[in-house]
Amino acid sequence: MSKSGDSQQHVKFPFMPLGIKIESVFGLLKALDVVFNRHADLYKLAEYFDLEIDDLIPVLEVAEMLGFAVIDGGDIFLTESGELFIRAPVQSRRSILRERIKNFEPFKSALSLINKQGSFKIEDLINLLSNLGYSEIGEIGFHDKLAQTLIDWGLYSGLFSYSSEDNIFKKSKRKV
């Protein structure tokens, strides 16, 4: 039997799909709110964005993971949280997003590294995720998608900062 501290280290958290741009999620939520009156058929939504449904699904998944939308069968519904988020001022959106993404990988482990070391490189995070047993690290293009996702979502939300000169993620000056 393991100690309670040990079991906490091995709890796996949901992994946010990589490579999904914040702008894509915002656009989806805005369209659901303004164009579709909070509810849309997935195929009509894909048609609206001139996308194949398979290309839209990862964006839908992220919106659902964050609690901003619910997918039910062939439909998607904007949640009350999603409506509040999309209508909030930018600073409030950043704060809401920061609180939500902290509960998903790779952000949870990135924050763990920052809290322990003060900063990290992408390779440090990949090693930690590997040690935690996340199979996603074996996907093609994982390194680049991980870096881009951390920069896109982490910087926008103020979860951490990034120095492109030395490729290091650091603690944000914003209160996290």
Image (cartoon, helix red, strand yellow):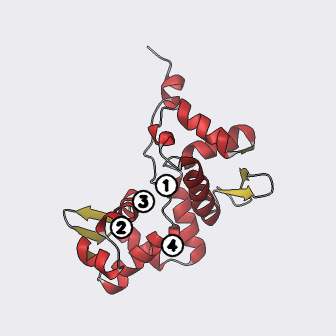
Amino acid under disc 4: Glu
Asked if disc 4 and disc 2 are in contact, CB closer than 8 Å, the reply is no
Rounded to the nearest angstrom, the CA distance separating label 2 from label 3 is 16 Å
Other residues around mark 2 within 10 Å, as few (<14) / some (14–19) / many (≥20): many
Locate the C terminus and report the quarter of the image it occupies.
Answer: bottom right
Front-lying residue, 14 or 43: 43
Residue 130 lies, with reference to residue 43, above or below; the image says above
Q: Earlier in the sequence, mark 3 or mark 1?
A: 1
Asked if disc 2 and disc 1 are in contact, CB closer than 8 Å, the reply is no
Report helix, strand or loop for mark 3: loop
Residue occupied by mark 3? 66
Q: Earlier in the sequence, mark 2 or mark 3?
A: 2
Q: Is residue 80 visible?
A: yes
Amino acid under disc 1: Leu
- Determine which of the numbered discs, if any, sits on residue 23 in the image: 4
Residue occupied by mark 1? 18
Rounded to the nearest angstrom, the CA distance separating label 1 from label 4 is 14 Å
In percent of width and height, residue 122 lies at 66, 46
Rounded to the nearest angstrom, the CA distance separating label 3 from label 1 is 14 Å
The residue that appears at 48% across and 62% down in the rendered structure is: 20
Comparing marks 3 and 4, which lies closer to the viewer? 4
